[in-house]
Image: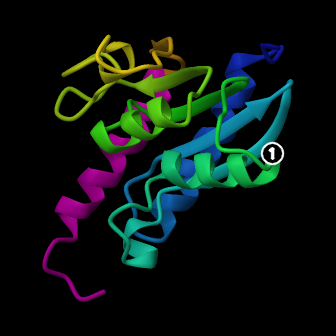
Amino acid sequence: MAEPLDHEACMRMALDLARQAGLHGDIPVGAVVIHQGKVIAMACNRREADQDPTAHAEILALRDAAKALGRRRLSDCILYVTLEPCPMCAGAMVMSSLGRCYFAARDERQGCAESIYALTQDPAFFHRLPCVGGLLEDEARELLRNFFEQKRTHKGEPS
């Protein structure tokens, strides 16, 4: 699998997408999929914008990557995401046979790449994939902190 030259640049793209999610009221999470050193898919959370509980950045990016490649197996792809994947997204990563995942902020409440559970490494599943956390974690965590702080500050105010 060809690794991109600059992991931080890929995560910065994901952070830019996360900021877009926050602008339309979604939790600021962004995801980028790389194949052979090139961006083939990118997305941000759209659960609120689309009123779709499955519209997580990772799911949307994996769907677009599969369409771009014309196949469901993404074993030669790398996902960069700003927040540790939840159970649904970690499961989608396993089921797509994703090659690798880098994430920024750890999710101590729902993270299923290492924090709460390492679903991506569970031997019960046919496919396991390496996940590396902490890439630009402080920036991602600050983005999330600001989003939720603003939500609490404006709670009850008309939109």
Magenta part of the chain: 137-159
Residue reaching furthest to the bottom = 158
Whether residue 130 sits left or right of residue 120 in the image: it is right
Please state which of residues 95 and 152 is positioned toward the viewer in this rendering.
95
Task: Classify 85 as above or below 17.
Answer: above
What secondary structure is the magenta-colored segment mainly? helix
The residue at 16%/71% (across/down) is 155
Q: Is residue 75 above or below residue 13?
A: above
Q: Quadrant of residue 156?
A: bottom left
Q: Position of residue 36 (x, y in %)?
A: 86, 25
Q: Position of residue 110 (x, y in %)?
A: 21, 35
Q: Looking at this view, is 142 or 101 the one in front? A: 101
The residue positioned 57% from the left and 59% from the top of the image is 20
Which residue is label 1 attached to?
69
Left/right of residue 99 with respect to residue 122 in the rendered view: right
User: Is residue 107 placed above or below 133 in the rendered structure?
Assistant: below
Residue 158 shown in magenta: yes
Foreground residue among 11 and 66: 66
Q: Residue 116: where, in percent of width, then height? A: 19, 22
Model colouring: rainbow
Residue found 22% across the figure and 20% down from its top: 117
Mark 1: give few (<14), some (14-19) or many (20+) Cα within 10 Å: few
Q: Is residue 109 magenta?
A: no
